[in-house]
Image (cartoon, grey):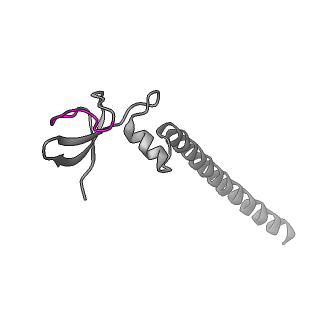
Amino acid sequence: MPDFAIRGHATLSPTQCILCGSSEPPFLDTVVDVIGYGRIYLCVGTDQKPGCLHQAARAAGCADPALRRVLETKVDDLEATVQMMRDQNDRLSHALGNLRSELNEVMA
């Protein structure tokens, strides 16, 4: 299996996307060389102008990069909220334990 990598520049000929001919970086380097053609690259593109790689990924049912970043941010926010609630739960449990102790002392 090829060891795919995102490259800032296509360094081996023909230094362009095999699908659309774009020479705008970044590229997915497939690490596959074809005799008579050269290295196979796919353009990655940007959020504003998706490249062939993003379009192929979307067609295959993979998440859009912009959506992925939004979802990752939401997950980070939810994890922070869960930690805050755990901390609050610990403080409330400790306070409840203190109240039980005081109640036991009064009832004794």
Of residues 88 and 15, the one nearer the viewer is 15
Residue 58: image location, x then y, percent: 48, 44
Q: Residue at x 28, y 35 (%)?
A: 17
Tell me the quarter of the image containing the C terminus.
Answer: bottom right
Residue 71: image location, x then y, percent: 55, 43
Q: Residue at x 63, y 55 (%)?
A: 86
Side of 108 relative to 98 (left or right): right
Number of dots carrying numbers: 0
Of residues 14 and 57, the one nearer the viewer is 14
SS assignment for the magenta stretch, majority: loop
Residue 39: image location, x then y, percent: 19, 42
Tell me the quarter of the image containing the N terminus.
Answer: bottom left
Hey, which residue is sitting farthest front in the picture?
36
Hey, which residue is sitting farthest right in the picture?
107
Of residues 67 and 48, the one nearer the viewer is 48
Q: Residue at x 62, y 48 (%)?
A: 84
Residue 2: quadrant of the picture: bottom left
What is the span of residues highlighted in magenta in the rendered image? 10-19
Hey, which residue is sitting farthest bottom in the picture?
108
Q: Residue at x 38, y 38 (%)?
A: 52
Residue 24: image location, x then y, percent: 30, 27
Of residues 98 and 57, the one nearer the viewer is 57
Side of 103 relative to 5 (left or right): right
Side of 5 relative to 13 (left or right): right
Up-down relation of residue 13 to residue 107 (above or below): above
In reply to whether residue 108 is colored magenta, the answer given is: no
